[in-house]
Image (cartoon, rainbow, N blue to C red):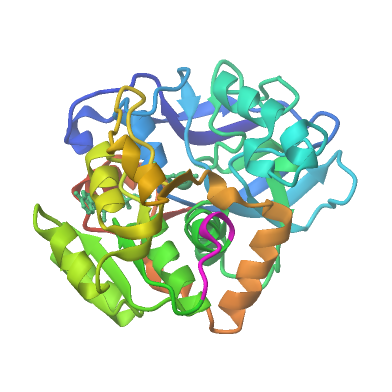
């Protein structure tokens, strides 16, 4: 079949994208699903900074690529056990083979064949179903239809509006998972979140959910500070050179846990400096591969500090997405507050300018 979707052919074109138009809306031939795969009518796809990082070249990927990885839709045809036409699904951006070492340990985010397929721009099986175009993280959700591995999909409640359901596949799973799985943050421990985009605000919602206190939120955009307060942050601080000292004051000497959700090694250094002795820094943002960060090595030892990476929220998607959806439906995880606006395929280049400016949270493409 022919699908219409947003294809990136060249990374690093100049801003504004409204003028350079890195995403071209093209018709691409999509082959039918192979064994263990699904054909999905995509309904909605969120715009994540990781899509922007492919566009601007800070997260290099094999070209050309049909972008979009935070998506939801309805199964049209299934060659996989456990899925039938009509099922509502959300996608996880790492397929979990279920058989490799990390999968066997319950660390689906580290699935080895999944990572290899994502690097190659293929589905988990190693094939491409898009003619002449690579898949983005096994999803390629910026198109009206997608063929995915069933191991990239999780069945969800069909009653969920698509523009909400899409968010669970990346922002919510990543941000809430960083708090619940990676940090295992407990009630009464203090937390600071750097960066209040879809991922950082999801981490904030996760910190509120588990009863962390106090909770400090940091961003460069003032409007986001007000939103963070309304979502449960006890302090919201403007980013800048003084912010580490301000966090140390707000948390009586440094936060137990710091979350970096910006994608900057410099901010990661601030996050580390904002933790107390014995504190843990969880790094979620994805800086350019050339960026390094440095900490006084002895502080890891003499102050028993920890730095932990968190990919895909250290999640098991088939376990965590249904849990987070149930919490949303119970009013405990108001992720609808992350939705800024909905857009169409032809608006995508402008929408990525807005994301780059930091003024939106989640813009969601409706298909
Ligand atoms: N680890 C994972 O599995 C995973 C998953 C999804 C996204 N990511 C990464 O997480 C990061 C955040 O993604 P997002 O979609 O929420 O991005 P976003 O662009 O929506 O949010 C980033 C926020 O950081 C703020 N910011 C910029 N500079 C700052 C500074 N110096 N101090 C504090 N805040 C600052 C921006 O104003 C913005 O609000 C990106 O690097 C993305 O690639 C990682
Ligand atoms: Zn993402
Ligand atoms: Zn695996």
Residue 331 in which image quadrant: bottom right
Residue 212 x/y as whole percent:
43, 76
Give the total of numbered labels.
0
Residue found farthest to the right:
81
Residue found farthest to the bottom:
331
Depth check, front residue: 244 or 147:
244
**Which residue is at a point 50% across and 56% down the rendered structure image?**
178
Asked whether residue 361 appears in the rendered view, the answer is no
Asked whether residue 291 appears in the rendered view, the answer is yes
Residue 147 x/y as whole percent:
69, 36
**Which residue is at a point 48% across and 25% down the rendered structure image?**
65
**Which residue is at a point 50% across and 62% down the rendered structure image?**
179
Residue 185 painted magenta: yes
Left or right of 237 on screen, residue 318:
right
The N terminus - image quarter: top right
Query: Magenta segment, which residues?
Result: 181-186
Instruction: Please determine whether, in this image, residue 72 is positioned above or below residue 18.
Output: below
Left or right of 172 on screen, residue 355:
left
**Which residue is at a point 21% across and 66% down the rendered structure image?**
247
Depth check, front residue: 62 or 243:
243
Instruction: Please determine whether, in this image, residue 366 is positioned above or below residue 52.
Output: below
Residue 346 in which image quadrant: top left
Residue 3 in which image quadrant: top right
Residue 59 x/y as whole percent:
38, 28
Residue 350 x/y as whole percent:
25, 44
Left or right of 257 on screen, residue 154:
right
Residue 148 painted magenta: no
């Amino acid at each position: 079949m022919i699908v219409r979707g947003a294809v990136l052919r060249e990374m690093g074109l100049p801003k504004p994208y409204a003028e350079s138009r890195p995403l071209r809306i093209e018709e691409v031939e999509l082959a039918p699903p192979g064994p263990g795969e699904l054909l999905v009518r995509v309904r909605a796809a969120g715009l994540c900074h990781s899509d922007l990082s492919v566009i601007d070249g800070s997260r290099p990927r094999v070209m050309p690529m049909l972008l979009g990885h935070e998506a939801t839709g309805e199964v049209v045809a299934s060659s996989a056990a456990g899925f039938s036409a009509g099922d509502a699904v959300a996608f996880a951006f790492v397929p979990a083979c279920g058989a490799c070492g990390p999968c066997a340990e319950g660390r689906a985010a580290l699935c080895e064949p999944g990572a290899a397929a994502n690097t190659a721009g293929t589905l988990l099986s190693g094939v491409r179903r898009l003619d002449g175009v690579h898949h983005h993280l096994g999803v390629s959700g910026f198109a009206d239809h997608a063929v995915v591995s069933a191991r990239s999909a999780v069945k969800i409640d069909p009653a969920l509006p698509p523009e909400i359901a899409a968010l669970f596949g990346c922002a919510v799973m990543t941000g809430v998972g960083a708090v619940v799985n990676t940090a295992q943050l407990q009630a009464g421990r203090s937390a600071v979140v750097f960066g209040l985009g879809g991922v950082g605000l999801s981490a904030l919602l996760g910190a509120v959910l588990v009863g962390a206190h106090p909770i400090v939120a940091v961003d460069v955009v003032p409007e986001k500070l007000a939103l963070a307060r309304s979502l449960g942050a006890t302090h919201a601080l403007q980013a800048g050179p003084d912010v580490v000292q301000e966090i140390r004051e707000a948390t009586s000497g440094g936060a137990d846990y710091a979350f970096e959700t910006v994608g900057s090694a410099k901010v990661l250094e601030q996050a580390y400096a904002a933790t107390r002795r014995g504190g843990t820094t969880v790094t979620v943002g994805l800086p350019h591969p050339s960026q390094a960060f440095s900490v006084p090595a002895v502080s890891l030892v003499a102050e028993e500090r920890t730095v932990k990476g968190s990919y895909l929220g250290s999640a098991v998607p088939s376990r965590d997405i249904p849990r987070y959806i149930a919490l949303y439906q119970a009013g405990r995880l108001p992720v609808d507050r992350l939705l800024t606006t909905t857009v169409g395929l032809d608006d995508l280049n402008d929408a990525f300018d807005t994301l780059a400016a930091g003024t939106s949270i989640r813009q969601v493409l409706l298909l």
